[in-house]
């Protein structure tokens, strides 16, 4: 059975996200660990988290994805900004231990004028400070579109980060198909070759989650603007090939398309039908 869900709002609590997921036919989902601007997170309601755990077990959910605030920058030139990223991620990972065995995804960061080599070292250093050998959460680097000075625009950059991380078994990659397409990887016409390239450079065993988004912009545009499934430059056929691909089909697929719940429900239904 296809593992598919979407990004959900955590404003009504954790169990409520599980209920919303069920309502729209999802068996996984993603949520922001706190308001995307990265402010202080609400105190964790352990009772609420326990109810979500129960609901997920009862309904056979796949692993879920916590997403770090996208405003964090682990490779800012400003030490205070890097420190803020470190503290926030460390706190998020502690909280995730109350929902063990899931994923924590983050955007590697933007190196601004420092150059990607320096950015890569700073990101790996931060990970080496926060990863615990006994943690139950796998931390994911998200593939980026290469907007501005984003690090993670190529498989080589992601691998350069992973190579420097000590707790390698706690790390993985989340492939955002809108981002890789915008970064110049042709997942529409050359999906097999792109996956072979990923395997050669990073290793497919590191690939844990797919962000399934269409793109408002053409291949290699370095833009990062998501479109509804089938309405962008990737198109429905490419999306269906992705969810059916033998090396991807068992991974959790998360939609981050411009939709409300009803739109997500339609996309989930469409992809479930197309996947079998
Ligand atoms: Fe993201
Ligand atoms: Fe994404
Ligand atoms: Zn994006």
Image (cartoon, grey):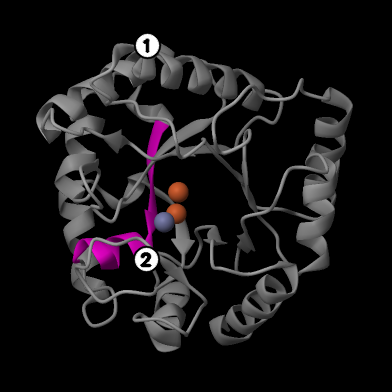
Q: Tell me the quarter of the image containing the N terminus.
A: bottom right
Q: Residue 22: give its label.
A: none
**3D distance between C-alphas at marks 2 and 1:** 31 Å
Location of residue 124 with respect to 48 vertically, above or below: above
- Report crowding for label 2: few under 14, some 14 to 19, many 20 or more residues within 10 A (C-alpha): many
Write down the region rendered in magenta: 171-184
Location of residue 140 with respect to 72 vertically, above or below: below
Badge count: 2
Residue 182 placed where, x, y %? 27, 65
Q: Residue at x 51, y 35 (%)?
A: 68
Dot 2 beta carbon under 8 Å from ligand 3? yes
Residue 40 placed where, x, y %? 64, 21
Residue 34 placed where, x, y %? 63, 33
Q: Which residue is mark 2?
A: 178
Q: Residue at x 23, y 83 (%)?
A: 189
Q: Which residue is mark 1?
A: 129
Front: mark 2 or 1: 2
The secondary element bearing badge 1 is classed as: helix
Q: Is residue 182 magenta?
A: yes
Q: Nearer the viewer, residue 130 or 43?
A: 43
């Amino acid at each position: 059975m296809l593992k598919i869900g979407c990004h959900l709002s955590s404003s009504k609590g954790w169990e409520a996200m599980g209920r919303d997921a069920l309502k729209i036919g999802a068996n996984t989902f993603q949520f922001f660990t706190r308001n995307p601007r990265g402010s202080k997170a609400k105190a964790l309601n352990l009772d609420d988290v326990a109810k979500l755990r129960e609901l997920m077990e009862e309904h056979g959910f796949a692993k879920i994805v916590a997403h770090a605030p996208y405003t964090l920058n682990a490779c800012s030139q400003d030490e205070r900004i890097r420190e803020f990223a470190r503290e926030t991620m460390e706190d998020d990972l502690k909280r995730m231990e109350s929902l063990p065995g899931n994923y924590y995804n983050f955007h590697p960061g933007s190196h601004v004028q420092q150059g990607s080599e320096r950015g890569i070292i700073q990101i790996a250093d931060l990970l080496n400070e926060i990863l615990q050998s006994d943690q139950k959460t796998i931390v994911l680097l998200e593939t980026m579109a290469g907007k501005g000075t984003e690090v993670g625009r190529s498989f080589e950059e992601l691998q350069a980060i992973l190579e420097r991380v000590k707790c390698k078994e706690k790390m993985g990659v989340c492939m955002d198909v809108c981002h890789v397409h915008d970064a110049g990887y042709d997942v529409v016409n050359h999906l097999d070759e792109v996956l072979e390239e990923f395997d050669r450079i990073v290793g497919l065993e590191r690939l844990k989650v797919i962000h399934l988004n269409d793109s408002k912009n053409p291949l290699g545009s370095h833009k990062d603007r998501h479109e509804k499934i089938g309405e962008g430059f990737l198109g429905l056929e490419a999306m269906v090939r992705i969810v059916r691909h033998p090396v991807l089909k068992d991974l959790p697929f998360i939609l981050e398309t411009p939709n409300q719940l009803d739109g997500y429900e339609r996309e989930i239904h469409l992809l479930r039908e197309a996947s079998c």
